[in-house]
Image: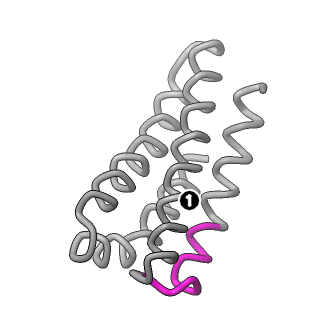
Amino acid sequence: VQRKALRAAAGLRPVMVVLRKRDRSLFDQVHRAMISVVLNTAEADGNDPGTAKTRFASACGSAKEVRAGLQLAVAYGYVASSKAAKVDTALDEVCAMSWRLSGR
């Protein structure tokens, strides 16, 4: 999950460049949510099972937040849907994996 989250973060970079210029607030929100995805998956890996499940659930929620931010960026015309699609798919996979690992 961690590696896939990092690949999603790398894929998000071009979108983030645009968001930083066009909508600082949306940039900040998406940026913090992506950080949360990566760090929560890392923290889950080194924790007891109960805490790990909570961290994986948080990672999924943050991945959904990033996906919503991407959808807003497309809706506002900041980025083309084709630029967001690959990252959206990767985040969907991160969320699915994290959700399963959360035991929910």
> Which residue carries the number 1 mark?
67
Residue 44 found in image quarter = top right
Image spot of residue 56 (x, y percent)? 61, 32
Q: Is residue 23 left or right of residue 91?
A: left
Measured from the top left, where is residue 85 in percent x and y? 61, 77
In the image, the segment drawn in magenta is: 79-88
| Mark 1 element type | helix
Tell me the quarter of the image containing the C terminus: top right
Judge from the rendering whether residue 35 lies leftward or rightward of residue 50; answer left or right.
left
Residue at position x 21%, y 76% in the image: 21
Residue 79, above or below 26: below
Residue at image location 31% in from the left, 71% down from the top: 19
User: Callout 1 environment at 10 Å: few (<14), some (14 to 19), or many (20+)?
Assistant: many
**In the depicted structure, whether residue 57 falls above or below residue 28:** above
State yes or no: residue 32 in magenta.
Answer: no
Q: Is 35 positioned to the left or the right of 56 in the image?
A: left
Find residue 89 and report its image quarter. Answer: bottom right
**Quadrant position of residue 92:** bottom right
Q: Please tell me which residue is depicted at 58% across the width and 86% down the height of the picture.
A: 82
As shown in the figure, which amino acid type bears the numbered disc 1?
Answer: Arg
For the point 26% across and 76% down, the residue is: 22
Of 99 and 43, nearer the camera is: 99
- The secondary structure that dominates the magenta segment is helix
Task: Tell me residue 83's x, y (percent).
Answer: 52, 83
